Image (tube, coloured by chain):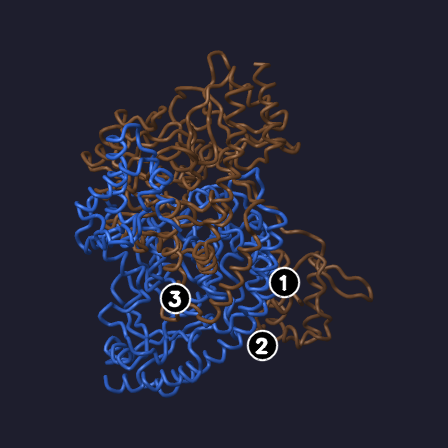
Chain colours: A brown, B blue
Amino acid sequence: MDPIFELQLRRPAKGSRAAADCLFRQLRDAIAEGRLAPGAQLPPTRRSQAVFGVSRNTCASVYDKLLGAGYLTSRHGSGTFVALRRPPEPQPAAPLGEPDARLNPLWLAGGVTAAMGFWQEAPERVQTAPVAADFRPALVDPQHFPHDVFRRVSTQQLRALERKPASLRSPQGNPGNLALRNAITHHIALTRALACRPGDVVATSGAQQGFDLLARVLVRAGETVVAVEDPGYPPLRVPFMAAGATVVPVPVDEEGLVVEALPREARIICVTPSHQFPLGVAMSPARRHALLRHARERGAVIVEDDYDGEFRFDGGPLQALKAADSADLVFYVGTFSKCALPSLRLGFIVAPPWAMQALVAAKNAQDWHCSTPLQVTFAAFIADGHLTRHVRRMRELYGRRRELVRHALLGPLAKWLEPLPSFYGMHTAAVARPGVDVEATARRALDDGVQVHTLGRYHLGPATRTGLIFGYAATAPAQLALGVATLRRALSEG
Amino acid sequence: MDPIFELQLRRPAKGSRAAADCLFRQLRDAIAEGRLAPGAQLPPTRRSQAVFGVSRNTCASVYDKLLGAGYLTSRHGSGTFVALRRPPEPQPAAPLGEPDARLNPLWLAGGVTAAMGFWQEAPERVQTAPVAADFRPALVDPQHFPHDVFRRVSTQQLRALERKPASLRSPQGNPGNLALRNAITHHIALTRALACRPGDVVATSGAQQGFDLLARVLVRAGETVVAVEDPGYPPLRVPFMAAGATVVPVPVDEEGLVVEALPREARIICVTPSHQFPLGVAMSPARRHALLRHARERGAVIVEDDYDGEFRFDGGPLQALKAADSADLVFYVGTFSKCALPSLRLGFIVAPPWAMQALVAAKNAQDWHCSTPLQVTFAAFIADGHLTRHVRRMRELYGRRRELVRHALLGPLAKWLEPLPSFYGMHTAAVARPGVDVEATARRALDDGVQVHTLGRYHLGPATRTGLIFGYAATAPAQLALGVATLRRALSEG
């Protein structure tokens, strides 16, 4: 396409002098700002009237002036071109530690950067060699997702959308949102035995937006204290920090969050009761009861992050904490990043009725609603039973990988590691026996292409115990076995 | 599917008494919480060992106890069923004015509710009759969007995604983001003559998330003063209020924002220079120059909201304000809600390099990234030239509708209204001549099925002038003509 056309040069004022000046300035700016690409050909002067609205002589004088100033080059016989100079490169962003004074410093603070990047290796540690095995938690195996089914459902739903386009009565026309919330209620009733109504559900862009919306509506900047599990999921902390809350770490043991250790002033308590992240343990019935009583007595609310509760193996607790929430103080945050795909960016909040109006207002203010094509597609994907079937398949597949890891922990790795009990989800953890240096082990393993996280990475406060986390969802059995052998070697060298 | 299976009852403790109590409590809770639907059939006692892990006698005793307590009903010969009682209905949300003390009161404040709902009629005013004509601004005509092309591109891209699934090295695997940012740079170079690099772009869930991210990274709660155009786009104000900024209205005249009226302490200045929302005027070159100088001298930044600049008609300024941003202090917020579809929820920010790291951190903390299937689909939709073709088609179509409205304003409606100059976009505005009651006119028009907004709806401070806004994008010519006739009648009655 002719760039000149898209440059939409303003018609020059009348009078050849004014016209020449006007055209000269516009072409010069366009070249300086890179809107006219280096090497681009300019229209021949004989077309100047049509293209620029100036006479051929005026155009020729402007070209001469630009040639003289070095903006253009002329190749004899072939025409006039933009000189091969490039617009200036952007300056690098301000390095960490010295944020621009115009920015809220929070976003460049080391703690925030580390929390959001918890899943990455430090740049200097990143392996260029192919990864032999990846034990990082919170990874899914996308190979087994029914991409073809999703694509078929998507095509059907886009066709259906076309037949009933977004209502003109709303500039944010949001068909599909109710269908998705409906489908979500069925999904959690089946997989989590959790009863709720579509009116209790807010669809979000993944659990992360769920945390952010809850921070928005529940936190009063400078006042609210938020208790988080330690160790815990680092990115959960950031939205609460950004909302101006004080985030306090609370220890976790084999029974889950240590309720007695909760600060009296905590008004928001964030927990992963089904499958503690990253320890993998389930919160004991006694602790659940104590937590609900504590929240009720202190007027606190609970944020239940149930990120992989769909993957339930033998035993384990019956219910989500939300299912026992008789006092309407639990916010249940779910995600489709684990039971479907993280790249979809879909999740939800099941909220008490008293908070729904504020949550919807906060969601609208943030991005109005999730993308309609995605909402209608995933609603149908759930309603047609595809998600349930996928979860069942993955429950078996992840179950087999889990057994492989647990056997390794009870066998070849038992000398160095003591596994923690785990009945749900996509990872399990093991505590280091006395004298084992897990940090050195993880570094050695990474040098051999095996990524494994230590518990230290997940602590906000001082680490109370050391250990390793074994995410088994994203790695095929052969690679898991290879990873175990590599880890055994790394441990034995410690 | 058998609900009992999905209830995953915990295996009762040994000993028939304990087993009976355990089973009784779980079934009772499941029924009370609605996880066992009213009318659902329970397994026959002969299957109790297989389903519940208890003896037939124990199961029978539990059923009897539940029957006695009214949780179950028994139909002779046909089995045992959950009694037809429903879980309690959720309580209504707290009414406006008395927010729950656990909530940040901002989200229930009248100002926020009004700002986010600016495009709606008050509930008691909502028309149930079909809308004869809709002059509200910021609406698009989805009928003309190439849904079939979008669907084809989507299917192709989902297939391509399947072949290279999200990298396992990132739990937020985000392929397609760079492709989308690349495509965005081409789109704005073509339609807005704005030169930037993919590294300058953050893809967002529409312009609204762009405003929210900018509020997050640029506002210091309790300190920052933000200047907004008055009248202006109400939902822009809310993210800045939520971030703890003081939002100050600044008057707008026929040349755009009155730069001299900017408060000295304003550190963020939000403007719509190409097509003021809602007046429709373009910011004059003198004002643009004065605004950039003011921001430079005061150390302020500018948020340029260019929501419909793709639709450029004769005359008008050549450039986006960002194109003249030599001092790197303009944040350009773009959206695909107007030039494509609002239901996609896609937009972007072109940001100065010094702010990019913080913006990406804030985006990650909010929802990591936009949905990958959507990103890859829209990137290809742009790269294949479909968006440019659509914009050109709509430029002509909207241009014709615009002419129809402008002729009406210069003809049949001229007695009551004086049109404001407008060269861009999807709406234009007209000021009321002395003695014309536009509020009464709008009410009368709505009673006749014609939706038209008054300027008053868009004011944060006191309204300086009265008038009507004419969005012409979403309404077909015949309906526009009908709407004009209805308005003429409504005006003549005033």
C-beta proximity under 8 Å, tags 2 and 1:
no
Q: Where residue B273 sits in the image (x, y, percent)?
A: 44, 63
- Percent across and percent down for residue B371 are 50, 51
Query: In the rendered structure, which disc, 3 or 2, sits on the residue that comes first in sequence?
Result: 2
Which residue is denoted by mark 2 in the rendering? A14
Task: Give the number of the disc on residue A171.
Answer: 3
Looking at this view, is B462 or A418 the one in front? A418
Q: CA distance from mark 1 to mark 3?
A: 27 Å
Same subunit, tags 3 and 2: yes
Q: What is the distance, in whole Å, between disc 3 and disc 2 at their CAs?
A: 43 Å
Up the image or down, A229 lies above or below A35; here it is: above
Point out residue A22 in the picture as x, y percentages from the top left corner. Answer: 59, 68
Q: Residue A1 at x, y = what percent? A: 66, 67
Chain for disc number 2: A
Within 10 Å of the Cα at label 2, are there few (<14), some (14-19), or many (20+) other Cα atoms?
few
Give the chain letter at badge 1. Answer: B
- The disc at residue B384 is 1
Q: Which amino acid type is marked by label 2?
A: Lys
Q: CA distance from mark 2 to mark 1?
A: 40 Å
